[in-house]
Amino acid sequence: MSSDKALISLRDVDKFYGDYHALRDVSLDIFPGEFFSLLGPSGCGKTTLLRTIAGFEDVSSGTLSIGGQDMAGVAANRRPTNMVFQSYAIFPHLTVAENVGFGLRRSNYSRGERHARVSDALEMVGLGGYGKRAAHALSGGQRQRVALARALILKPKVLLLDEPLSALDKKLREQMQVELIRLQRQVGITFVLVTHDQEEALIMSDRIAVMFEGRIAQLEEPEALYQRPGSRQVAEFIGVMNFLGAHVISNEGNALELDVAGLGHAVIGRDQCPGGPVSGMCHVGIRPETMTLLFEDRGDGPVADGVVDEVVYYGDMTYYDIKLDGVPKPITLSMKNMIGRPVLDIGTRTKVGWDPRALVAFS
Amino acid sequence: MSGPRKPRGLTVYAIAYLIFLYAPIILLPMFAFNASTIIAFPLQGFTTEWFVRLTGVQALHTAVRTSLFIAVVSAILATILGMCAARAGTRYEFPGKGGILGLIMLPLVLPEIIVAVSLLVVVVQILQFPLSAWTVIMAHTLICTPFCIAILNSSFQNLDASLEEAAIDLGESRWNAFRLVTLPLVTPGIIASLLISFTISLDEFIIAFFLTGSEPTLPVYIWGLLRFPQQLPVVMALGTILVALSILLLIVAEYFRRRGVRRAGKTETGGFL
């Protein structure tokens, strides 16, 4: 993908608040029709970046263009973007229909057209017939839908979403995640989502930019991000990753021979070092679900020995902390609960099956 | 069986307190309708003569007009200043913010006589302005502004900062966003602020006494009447009207303040009543 097809293009963007360096040298391209997420812990600059795209913040240096047009000096109300705010910012003194139709005030549609478009927008977010209700009487989920309808009615090139689901309870949040994906496919508008919830980002996004301290640490598709995180920091932020000490035995051609603490001998490919070349002492990461407890001594892959240190039962899954022989810090692994499969007690000696293809190595 | 025992002593104290506070105000209408020029019990009979006599005094009418003019202008100025301060205080961060806002609120606790004397010195000695209705307006604006800020702060604080941004995001200019979103939501607060500062200015005596020129305000005029004992019932009648008007305005102001809090979808966070 080349940058001239990009809908939003940032080049070397820096942002200072006084001495505080909020965005550091951010360059990225967001393509038309993408569901793009900015993911990171609070204070990482993701919201600042979103507000910069929206036009509520200026860049201190660097350039931002949307649809090939430089946005320097273009105020927020002239940009082809619309935003869903974290608080939803529903106008409490207006009705639902007046809220949704707010952006049409400046258009030259007739009353009838305006009314029809408001009804369509409400229908689209599943609030058909709610137009006459007072906005302040809505529930959290309904406010969210009104905010979406209000932003989408202007058919922006980009819809910006600032942690739109963080105020909702878990059930509603999961339901809205699916609905947002459906909505995005339906309208075909580029969505840029800010979230601190890695699971949410993985579920919804086409691509994810992980941010730490104002910098983009990694920009990848969800699967690649999860399986081949580019740094230890990213690996720890996205899902659960166990880290074990290791050293490189040999480094020939496309293969790397490692001795991993607790697991033993492993040969991995060069693509399993996503953070760059590895030599000498290093760290090896492995995800909980890529390992398995061997209840009977079977399985043909490599096997490690250990003792159950902690058991957390989740219903569908059980998470075990296992102390591998020779490794003081326990590692976490997850097992799907199945009929006839026991849940082990703390202190049980067990064998752990693992797969060298699941390893990632960092220097 | 019962809840916590009520301390009887406190109840007695509270009732006595209320009597001391409000008995003089209750006496006011009593004597205003009393058919005798001597302010004493027993009451002599019912009359509306004193109220009728009010209508014939030319100087009184002038004083009322002066007072109303001063009160309206002071209320508008204080409310505008209060809006600026409340918005700055709730929306922006700037160096020395706490100190500046504290300084603006200072007239609330300064003895009025001190404010009056210092203003007189400043206006007459330093600025060398002639005393007029405008000097009183300046001073009343000063003492009303803290009240306006207190009222408007609660209106502006309850406002989500992203509401205006949302309006801008939907294509409106900054000014339109303020006009279409912020203003309707703080209007009840503005009305409450206007009414409160109007009432304060209308009733204020000490500062007006010092700073007024050849046209006395109503309280200053009343003070002048007190020298003539036979005029006392007329003063009582006038006082009755003023008290009734003040209470009415205060109630209306609080009604609007509460409506504002409700409109912003927030819960009660204090107030004057």
Image (cartoon, helix red, strand yellow):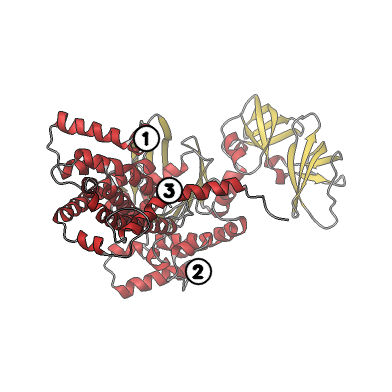
Of A26 and B213, the residue lying toward us: B213
Q: Are marks 1 and 3 in contact (CB under 8 Å)?
A: no
Q: Are marks 3 and 2 in contact (CB under 8 Å)?
A: no
Secondary element under disc 1, as helix, strand or loop, is helix
Q: Which mark is residue A126?
A: 2
Secondary element under disc 3, as helix, strand or loop, is helix
Residue topped by disc 1: B102
Q: Residues within 10 Å of mark 1 (few under 14, many from 20)?
A: few
Between the C-alphas of marks 2 and 1, the distance is 49 Å
**Kind of residue at disc 1:** Gly
- What residue appears at the point 79 percent right and 35 percent down from the top-left corner? A323
Q: Could you tell me residue A314's position as x and y percent?
A: 74, 51
Along the horizontal axis of the image, is A326 left or right of A106? right
- What residue appears at the point 70 percent right and 29 percent down from the top-left corner? A245
Q: Chain of mark 2?
A: A
Secondary element under disc 2, as helix, strand or loop, is loop
Mark 1 or mark 3: which is in front?
A: 3
The outermost residue toward the top is A280
Q: Are marks 2 and 1 in contact (CB under 8 Å)?
A: no
